[in-house]
Amino acid sequence: MHSFPKELLSGHANFLAGRYLREKERLRDLASAGQSPTTMIIACCDSRAAPEMIFDAGPGELFVLRNVANLVPTYQPDGGQHGTSAAIEFAVKALNIGNIVVMGHGRCGGIKAALDPHFKSLDDGDFIGKWMSMLGELPSQLGQNSLLTSTERQTAMERISIRNSIRNLRTFPYVAELEAEGTLQVHGAWFDISTAELWIMDHDGDFIRPEL
Amino acid sequence: MHSFPKELLSGHANFLAGRYLREKERLRDLASAGQSPTTMIIACCDSRAAPEMIFDAGPGELFVLRNVANLVPTYQPDGGQHGTSAAIEFAVKALNIGNIVVMGHGRCGGIKAALDPHFKSLDDGDFIGKWMSMLGELPSQLGQNSLLTSTERQTAMERISIRNSIRNLRTFPYVAELEAEGTLQVHGAWFDISTAELWIMDHDGDFIRPEL
Amino acid sequence: MHSFPKELLSGHANFLAGRYLREKERLRDLASAGQSPTTMIIACCDSRAAPEMIFDAGPGELFVLRNVANLVPTYQPDGGQHGTSAAIEFAVKALNIGNIVVMGHGRCGGIKAALDPHFKSLDDGDFIGKWMSMLGELPSQLGQNSLLTSTERQTAMERISIRNSIRNLRTFPYVAELEAEGTLQVHGAWFDISTAELWIMDHDGDFIRPEL
Amino acid sequence: MHSFPKELLSGHANFLAGRYLREKERLRDLASAGQSPTTMIIACCDSRAAPEMIFDAGPGELFVLRNVANLVPTYQPDGGQHGTSAAIEFAVKALNIGNIVVMGHGRCGGIKAALDPHFKSLDDGDFIGKWMSMLGELPSQLGQNSLLTSTERQTAMERISIRNSIRNLRTFPYVAELEAEGTLQVHGAWFDISTAELWIMDHDGDFIRPEL
């Protein structure tokens, strides 16, 4: 016997009876030919912001890394085990991805934690604090701005963090190189989980509503 | 102007016209109340194995970490930036998740790399090799068995890796504690991307086909 | 009076009242014209893995050899009484069979015995041990791999044994010859008695789920 | 790609859509609990004489050995690989079978070969001739009787062979012992493939039509 969550099993049965039936051929082809997604999405673990839902994407379309707050570290070839960097390397070098989208979202718990001054004092077992420290001084710099409401600060930080991740992404030599060559493009996006609005980053780093 | 991928924008338009219309209320409620998923899925970045597709899950249901080959490191409170550990901490401590599912899948590129003896010789910029080294000696131990075809070795390693990740997950003190208390359950699953079959891990570590 | 098992008699009555009524003509034709099955199945004696059930086959369709663990010995023209070899010879030379399928199955008692180290020490009256010794060193080679659970080892050995039987089958000169000519094909299959799933062997020796 | 026989795959699909759906629970239970058939059938490979068809038997009911002409050798603990003896040992010792039925049938090709005087001169690669030599002098003794038509000789030999196999079966010490104890019964049966009539052997060795 097993105790596997019932709702996952019934969800899987729904998938088999619905989408799977319609996309059977495609899954089989993807399995034998291998995946060849053209886009990598770096997204958050948040249960309300699945890239496949937001972009109505089918199997084989999106190579998706999800970590807390969709952070990208700088290029650190120090022999450490860097999961996000490994995924980027795999996407760019093994899959020849053409686009990388760093997608943040509203009401992000990780960003909220980063903005919380009490978070810094956690002990060594505090992985979230350490992880969010990737933002460096950014949260405290923003946090001092009392003109913003806490919601505005949060949204601002979410977008600042996306720009920061994109900067870090460009410290990977092959990312910078391929972007210069024009075979790889780096994008930013922000999803409002309340209204389902998608905002995309323009060349100035601003988030705008795209025409659909 | 922006160069945001056209297919993502049209996919998002589809989402707005379809699922979003049907689940509008729910998204809005989830935004204001905050997320309260009961299950965390630790899955692979592979474009063919999105947990939301496999479990036909809607917004708010699954807290999803995705890294290369769905690996979980051991508990290492060393002050490093551990993305996977941060997500686990967030799920268990902030969201009070009741289930953690480590879900592997067939034809996993990361596992394939781990089984490839040439992978070890890459230089320091090799994040994939370093990342997969989390499996330690397991790939070489299995790799010596010439009775298995390369596909069988791959499947075996994918499952051995899931068992290994679950062992590592239990080195997190709060995971072990809550599991002992009965308020957290740890599960393994393996998805066959070709046939869309879900296999779940039983108490012996074997992967079986659940009744749906 | 006789003591013939009651359930066999009532089962036979069911057959006469059901299938026989529907296939009367066919049985009569098969009796007068002789059988001309195009496929031979080499299967196990296991009560849960009858080829006619698995392939929903009617009278005249399958020439079926069943022995413990569906083993095929190498070609040994030594004058001994080789039952399996006799059946193969009959199928290929007398019936001009076009396909031979070696079909194994899950939870096979013979394979289990072969993997059990205590089995080797049985005395000369131990026919099962001697019979399973046809697998040679394969079980002990596999058995040393502690990364696999006992169930995984069992499944692996079941499939390794099928590949071994197919290799042995090709030591029969006429099998090799006709296969080269293209008039005979040799196949492997594995049946999961728990889920009723059929797996077939591809050209690499891997077992895959066929499209139905 | 594979070349697995199409008719087997469509037959399997029929099984899954029909019988399997009705007996799903049973198969699953049989898989987890293990098989516990009460009857072993020793039958012929002939495509027209499947025991499961003749006795309308479901999964788990019959442990079935099938060789050419349903022959049973004498007990020969000589260290050789005896497939039929291994199956008998497994049925009696591991499964504690309560009944063994040796079932012959009309128009048996193996028996026909045994009655053919030209068969004896085949070379060493002749496994059928060697296999049928298990009948010893019986065919030639019968063959000299010119009062019987060839069909009658054939039927007679089929039944003589069943009696011979039952005698041989009783040379297995544990068969004789358990039969004496009353916990194992040995039976003979003969199936007319043309009319689907079942004949069972009575205590005198005669074949009679049972009441159904």
Image (spheres, coloured by chain):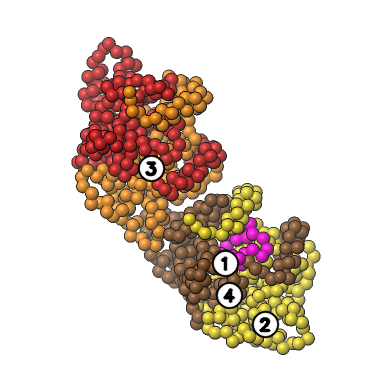
Chain colours: A yellow, B brown, C orange, D red
Residue at screen point 77% across, 82% down: A149
Amino acid type indicated by mark 1: Gly
Nearer the N terminus, badge 1 or badge 4? Answer: 4
Amino acid type indicated by mark 3: Ser
Amino acid type indicated by mark 2: Leu
Residue at screen point 49% across, 78% down: B76
Stretch in magenta: B38-64
> SS for tag 1?
loop
In the picture, residue B148 is in which quadrant? bottom left
Give the labeled residue for mark 1: B98
Q: Chain of mark 1?
A: B
Residue furthest toward the top?
D147
**Mark pair 1, 3: CA separation:** 40 Å
Q: Chain of mark 2?
A: A
Question: Tag on residue D36?
Answer: 3
**Mark pair 1, 4: CA separation:** 11 Å
Q: Chain of mark 4?
A: B
Amino acid type indicated by mark 4: Lys
Q: Are marks 2 and 1 on the same chain?
A: no
Other-residue count near label 2 (Cα within 10 Å), few / some / many at <14 / 14–19 / ≥20 = many
**Are discs 3 and 2 less than 8 Å apart at CB?**
no
Give the labeled residue for mark 2: A115
Q: Is residue B194 visible?
A: no
**Mark pair 4, 2: CA separation:** 18 Å
**Mark pair 3, 4: CA separation:** 49 Å
